[in-house]
Every structure is written in structure tokens, then in C-alpha cells.
Image (cartoon, helix red, strand yellow):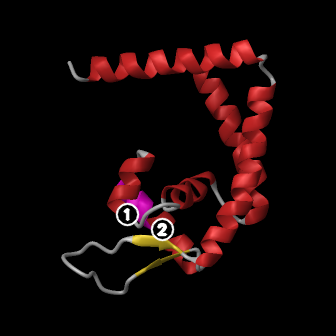
Amino acid sequence: MLKQAQSALRSRMDHDLRPLGLTVPQYACLELLRTESLTSAELARGMFVTAQSMNGVVQSLQERGLVARADTAPSGRRRPAALTETGRELLAEADTRVRRIEAQMIGALDPEGADQMVDGLAVIATTLRRDDRG
């Protein structure tokens, strides 16, 4: 059921973000850049994708003027990406759409059901993290 809910959420986000010219991965990238500049490798770890895939996402956002990266690295090869003002404005519009979807999801549950769902997901996450450590 979790996978079905995730798939439905992804489909709905794709639909609602499309008029803004954004994909879900692009939106997630902008969201990660909201508070700090990050390299493609850092973004990739945050989104559970390869660095090569993330580089394509960042490049497409850069071409649209939504993120900026220095032409040369200040040190080593690291060229962190940062949101531009245009990127912040588009992210604000995308956030409005995503928050509306979230409100619809939560609104389908009564308050007790919503609390139980959140608690259940927290237990699942804790259990999986604990099992991951061996």
C-alpha cells in the first residue's frame, strides 16, 4: 500500500508541476537547494539517485536560470549549485501546488487516522534504520 500511495503521489505531483515546466526530480532538487548550496554529489545523495543523473537535473535547471553554479570550482572540483531568485519564485509556486496535494492527502483521513499514519511511518523508518545497522 505504501508503494501504491507513493506512485499515486508521484503521478499527481507530475501532473500539477507540469504547467510550471518542472518534473518531480527538478522540484526535489530545488527543494534541497532552498536553504543551502549543494554539489551535484550532495544533491544525488539527498535524492537517492546517481551523481550522473543528478548532474543532468542540475544542468537543466541551470539552463533555465533556476540555479547557478560557478564556472570554475573555488577549490578542487566542487561547484555547488544555488537557487537563483527566479528559482526561488518558481519554487514558491511549486510549493503552493505540492502543499495543496499534501492537504488533500491528509484531509482524506480523520485527525486520529492521520496521527496513526504518521506514528506508523515513524515506527517503520526507525525499524528499518535499526536493521540497517546490523
Which quadrant, please, contains the C terminus?
top left
Query: Which residue is label 1 attached to?
Result: 40
39 left or right, relative to 2: left
At horizontal 43% and vertical 63% (from top left) the residue drawn is 36
Residue 101 drawn above or below residue 112: below
Amino acid at pointer 1:
Ser
Q: CA distance from mark 1 to mark 2?
A: 7 Å
**Looking at the picture, how far across and down is residue 58, in whole percent?**
48, 68
Amino acid at pointer 2:
Val
* Discs 1, 2 touching: Cβ within 8 Å: yes
At horizontal 35% and vertical 65% (from top left) the residue drawn is 39
Q: Secondary structure at mark 1?
A: helix
The reply to whether residue 31 is visible in this rendering is yes
Q: Viewer-proximal residue, 57 or 128?
A: 128
At horizontal 63% and vertical 13% (from top left) the residue drawn is 116
Q: Viewer-proximal residue, 70 or 5?
A: 70
Q: Residues within 10 Å of mark 1 (few under 14, many from 20)?
A: many
Q: What label sits on residue 58 in the rendered view? A: 2
Q: Main secondary structure of the magenta part?
A: helix
Which quadrant, please, contains the N terminus?
top right
15 left or right, relative to 26: right
